[in-house]
Image (cartoon, coloured by chain):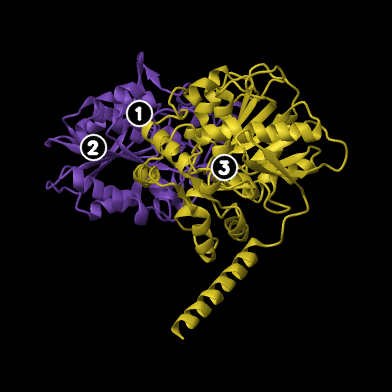
Chain colours: A yellow, B purple
Amino acid sequence: VTRARLLAVLVAFSAAHCALIQWAAGPPPAPAEFHRAKTRDGWEIELRRYKPAGAPQGPPVLCLHGIVANAYNVDLDERHSLARFVASRGREGWAMSMRGQGASTRPDWFAGRSADYDVDTIAAQDLPAAVAHVRAVTGAAEVDLIAHSLGGIAYYAWLAQGANAGTGAPSAAPGGIRRAATLGSPVVFRWGGWGESLARPLTMVGAWLPALPLRDLALISLPIHGAWDGPIERALLSFDNVDPVVWRRFMAVGADGISGGVLKQAARWIAEGRIVSRDGSVDYLAALASARTPTLVVAGRGDNMAAVHMVRPAYERLGAEKAWLVAGRADGARADYGHMDLLLGENAAEEVWAPVLAFLNAPAGTPAGTR
Amino acid sequence: MALWRLGDSKAKPPVLVLTDLGAPVRSVASLVAALRARGREVFVAEWPRDAAPEELFLRHGPRALGESLRGRDRVALVGHGVGGALALLLAAAAPDRVAAVVTLGAPVRWSVPNLAVERALDNGAPAPGTPGTRAEAMLYDGVPGPARWGPYPLERVAAWMREGDLRFHGASYARALAGVRAPVRAWCGTADDLVPREACLVLRDFVAHADARPAGRIEWMKRDYSHAGLVAGADAAREIFPAVAEFLEENAE
C-alpha cells in the first residue's frame, strides 16, 4: 500500500509539473519550417525557417543563441523572436540550436556522442553545417549571422579558424558568412565583486562535471522565475526591461544545459583571462585582428554577465569593417539592457534588432558607425 | 577650496571626504553623518566649482590632505567621482600617511565612448544632471529631489573622457597609481552613466590589490546605483555607507 501511495504521489507530482511547464511555456511557436542540418561528425542541428512576406531583400539571417539556451532564445514567441523580426523586415530568419541544445541531437554515450564538445566544436562543426544548410536550401551565396553571448564567441572562434578567409573562395572550411553581429559576447572575464569570487570556484568544480543539467534545474524551479529578482535574474536580466511572464516562458522552453566540454573551456578562459582554442594554440581575441567579415559588436549597458568592458575588446581588436553599439539609456535606449534583455527585452526589436539589421543591410564598404 | 572639520575624536585616524567636481559639501552629507555615527572625526573638502581635475590633483588635494594630517600620523580617504580619483593619487603620493582608501564611482580610465556625454560636449545637449531634462537621470537616478545639486561640469573632464587616460605634466594618471600601498575598496555604480563601471573597475589593472566591485543588483543591492546615487541615493545609507564604515574599521583603526 505504501508503494502504491508513493507511486500515486509521484504520478500526481509529475502530472502537475508537466501542467506547470505547459502553463509557463505559453502558446506553441508559430508555424515555422523545421529543418535539420547534418554536421560532418554526424550530429543534427535544429533549424527553424521563417520566410519574409515578399521576395527576400538580402541574404538569409542565421540567429544563434548563447550558453544555457536553445533556439527558443532567438525565437520564443511572436513578439520575442529575432528570427521572426528579421522575416518581418524582408529577410529570411533562421533560428538554430547548437548541438546538445533544443531539438538538436543530444549527447548519447551509447550512440558514441559524448558531451565533451566545446566552443571549438560548435565553431568547426555546428556553425558551418547550419550555414551550409541555409545556403543549400535558399540558394543564397552567403548568409548573415546574429549571435548572442557564447554564440558570438563561437563566431569569433570561427573567424579565427580562417573560415571566412577570402569570402566565396574555396578554403578548408566552407565560409559563407557575409556580415555579422554579436550581442553581449564577452572576450575577457572580469566581473569584480562576488560574481568573480564565485565564478572561479564554480567553473573549477564545473570543469570536472560531464555536463550541467541546467534545463532540469530551470524546470524544477520554474514557479520562482519571474516572481522573484533572484541571483539568476540579477545576473542575466532586468525586470525593468523584460516581462516576468516572458522570462518564465523562456525558462520553461529556452533554458538548456551546458556540456562538460564547454564548462571545461569556460573554466580555462576564466582562469587564464583570455579566450583560447582547446589546445591553447589560438587566442581568439588576438585573431580578430585578421578577420575580414564586417561585424557589429553590441553590448548591454546593464549586462552583469557580459559587462561592456568584457565585450568591448572584441570591437577594438577586429581588423574588419566594424561598428559598436551600446544598448543603454545614455546611448538613447529606454533601459540599460541586461544580458537576456538583448533578446527578450520588450523594446529589443526597436532598440537593438533594428540597428543590427541596419548594419547587416548596409552594402559592403559602407562607412560603419565606428564609435 | 573649503575644508570642514566635524568632531574631534582622536581615537582613530580621521577620514578625509573628497567631494566630486562641481558637487557641494551637502552631496556627501549623509555619508559624513554615517561616518560620524561610527565615532569618526571627519574632514570634508569642497572644490571651487570651476576647478579642473589637474588643479585638484596638484593644488587643492595635497592642501586638504596636509590640513587633515595636522597632529596626526595617518588619515583615511573617501572620495566620490573625481574626488575618488584624487584619493587614489594622494594615496600613491603619500603612502605612509594614508591608512585606507574608499572610492565611489571614481574614474581611472575611460575606454568606451558615451553618446549622451559626446552630444552634451559637441552639440550643447544638456549636461548630465540638468534639471528637467532626460539627462537629469544620467546623474541622479535614485536620488531624491532635494539631495540633487545641479548639472555636472562635464567640460572639466572632457579631455580625460576622450583620451581615456588623463595626462598632466607629462605623466599618466593611471600609471601614477602604481605607488598606492593602502588597502583600497572601490564601488562602481552599475547604472552610473557618467563614470560607467568599466571606467571604475579598471582600477585593478593599476592597483592590483584594490578590491573594486560593482554597486548594484548583482551585489544583492536593491538597485543599480547611479553616479550621484552612490553618495546621495535613497538606499545608499543602508547599502553603501555601512560597508564604507566597516571597511575603514577593518583597515584604518
Expressed as whole percent of the image width and height from the top left, the position of residue A254 reads 60, 52
Quadrant in which the C terminus of chain B is drawn: top left
Mark 1 → mark 2, Cα distance in angstroms: 15 Å
Please tell me whether residue A351 is drawn above or below residue A290 in the rendered image.
Answer: below
Q: Chain of mark 2?
A: B
Label 1 secondary element: helix
Which of discs 1 and 3 lies nearer the camera? The answer is 3
Q: Chain of mark 3?
A: A
Residue placed under numbered mark 2 in the picture:
B183
Residue placed under numbered mark 1 in the picture:
B205
Which of discs 1 and 2 lies nearer the camera? The answer is 1
| Within-10-Å neighbours for mark 2: few <14, some 14–19, many 20+ | many
Quadrant in which the N terminus of chain B is drawn: top left
Direction top: furthest residue? B170
What's under tag 2, amino acid-wise? Pro
Residue placed under numbered mark 3 in the picture:
A66
* Quarter location, residue B24: top left
What's under tag 1, amino acid-wise? Asp
